[in-house]
Amino acid sequence: MKKIVVLTGAGISAESGIKTFRDSDGLWEEYRIEDVATFDAWLKNRNLVLDFYNQRRKQLLECSPNAAHYALAALEKKYDVQIITQNIDDLHEKAGSTKILHLHGELKKARSTVDDNLIYDIEGWELKKGERCEKGSQLRPHVVWFGEAVPNIVPASQLSSKADIYLVIGTSLNVYPAAGLLNYVPANVPKYLIDPNGVAVAGTRNLTIIKEKAGKGVTELVEKLLND
């Protein structure tokens, strides 16, 4: 069974109603990165950071997977599919995909501020000040903030190096280290990039660019792959 590795970004979830950070009407228009998505922000204004992610979580509960998410889940009928996602939502899981590696954490989970191995599911949408781990420290959102290490980048690079087919969907390829994963894919492997803006990836061999939104582009590509 051939192995398809898929790298997804905010563009795949945008059609489900989840705002992206980089669009003109995206989240960064309303908040400064430094105020809500860094460890310094957590130290300076814990209430603001908790509220920011609570609102994101509340929004997520109202969102459903779109055609692109379901199409990727359907690929598992014929291929060994591994998804690497930069997104912190759970729409891939809801659509039925079974192998998902979250690079930047998971919105519906919290973790200890003294032990990164203590991770908890959040019931509902609210993580409150005063909720603590078993070691007594305040729980924080289980997300990778700007300036923090990305622990899952090593397994993500290993997965990318073993792909028989590689898909890149809805990502600007501007955020590192995730943007560098394409460099681990063997040169002879067929690669497909689906994004309406046609991201520039100079020097990448065997690359097909599909300038479509995720819903349309992924659905059509998956149909082709299932029929090959």
Image (tube, rainbow, N blue to C red):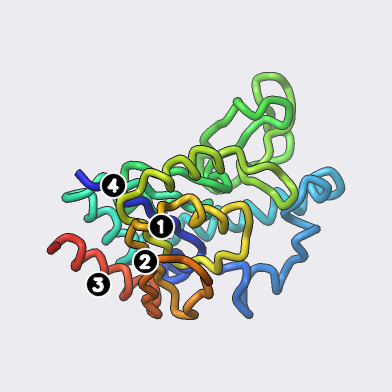
Q: CA distance from mark 3 to mark 4?
A: 19 Å
Residue to which mark 4 is pinned: 3
Identity of the amino acid at label 2? Asn
Secondary element under disc 1, as helix, strand or loop, is loop
Residue to which mark 2 is pinned: 206
- Classify mark 3: residues with Cα within 10 Å, few (<14), some (14-19) or many (20+): few
The reply to whether callout 1 and callout 2 are in contact (CB within 8 Å) is yes
Secondary element under disc 2, as helix, strand or loop, is loop
Residue 28: percent from left, percent from top? 69, 69
Q: Residue at x 86, y 48 (%)?
A: 44
Q: CA distance from mark 2 to mark 3?
A: 19 Å
- Classify mark 2: residues with Cα within 10 Å, few (<14), some (14-19) or many (20+): few
Q: Which mark is residue 187?
A: 1
In this view, 60 is above or below 117:
below
Q: CA distance from mark 3 to mark 1?
A: 24 Å
Identity of the amino acid at label 1? Ala
